[in-house]
Amino acid sequence: MNKIVFITGTSTGFGKLMTITLSKAGHTVIAGMRGTLGKNVEVAKELSALKNVEVVDIDITDDASVTNAFDNVLAKHGRVDVLVNNAGLAGFGLVEAYSIDQIKKFFEVNFYGVIRTYQAVLPSMRKAKSGLIINLTSGASGHSMPFMGPYLASKFGVEAITEAIQDELSQFNIENVTIQPGVYPTEMNSGSKVGIQADKPEITEEYNPVAAEMFNVIGAGLFGKMQEFDMNPQVIADGVLKLVNMEQGTRPLRYPLDAIAQGTDIEFINARAELKQKWMEKYTG
């Protein structure tokens, strides 16, 4: 069945691949991005030329922009069957070396942006008593790592929201899934897409040389593994398509797609679910 799929952050990386993949599969894709008449005008034209694709301008950090985008899509199509919260920002740095304003930028996009799209689409999904929302988080969304604290904190938040709202929305048959993508060679990791970096170099210097050495070891490990396992971003687009095509009621809450983890991510997710069940039994049993 053809579905109306709204994807955020489609100008590059996973989002662009999702748009191409889902539209080729026959789904109608609403490709959301900023700057459709400015910096992203060329990619907007490129995607608009594809069959089954409609490009819309949306800035997920702006309440009015999000409301306007969804209102227009719902007025035209009558429904949104699937929302994919793909837009995101990454970055590296010591926690102490980040200003509050820099950390807020992570949350405006990675966390509050998700809340905004939820609130824009849920009234129509609840009315239809049907829907699917897919949130991209991180391969490390269940734990943290040095130099990634603020970024992962914003992704932890999305994991928490997804898990909570899954139960809240069950009466409306609306499913929620987080995808944990691991490290892939997208613009976010290549350096071509500007991230949110620590902005207090004087603090960073006080941690050196130990911090610099630690950062280099971690970075070499992550990017070395990315090459070793030939991490292909198409895996994420294919994973989204698989989730979209799954029968209602069969989708998992968490859907890790990270070959580098070699199954440890699945083990972690299962262990966390078991412990949560035991904890819930203590409080509600």
Image (spheres, rainbow, N blue to C red):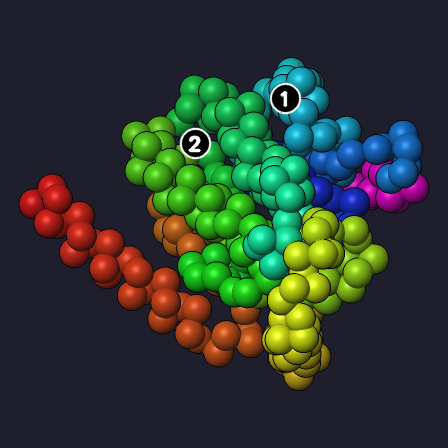
- Give residue 63's mark: 1
Q: Nearer the viewer, residue 153 or 24?
A: 153
Task: Give how far apart the Cα atoms at labels 1 and 2 are.
Answer: 24 Å
Does the magenta run of residues contain 50?
yes
Residue lying furthest bottom? 228
Residue drawn at x 67%, y 71% is: 208
Residue 201 is at least partly visible in this image: yes
- Give residue 44's mark: none
Q: Nearer the viewer, mark 1 or mark 2?
A: 1
Q: Nearer the viewer, residue 14 or 5?
A: 14
Q: Is residue 178 left or right of residue 116?
A: left
Residue drawn at x 66%, y 32% is: 60
**In this rendering, is residue 230 above or below 235?**
below
The quarter of the displayed image where residue 120 is located:
top right
User: Residue 207: percent from the left, percent from the top?
Assistant: 63, 67
Residue drawn at x 23%, y 59% is: 275
Q: Which residue is mark 2?
A: 130
User: Residue 132: percent from the left, percent from the top?
Assistant: 48, 39
Q: Amino acid at mark 1?
A: Asp
Q: Is residue 247 left or right of residue 7?
A: left
- State the SS at label 2: loop
Reading the chain from its start, which is encountered first: label 1 or label 2? Answer: 1
The quarter of the displayed image where residue 5 is located:
top right
User: Residue 155: percent from the left, percent from the top?
Assistant: 52, 49
Q: Which residues are magenta?
A: 42-52
**In this rendering, is residue 82 above or below 187?**
above
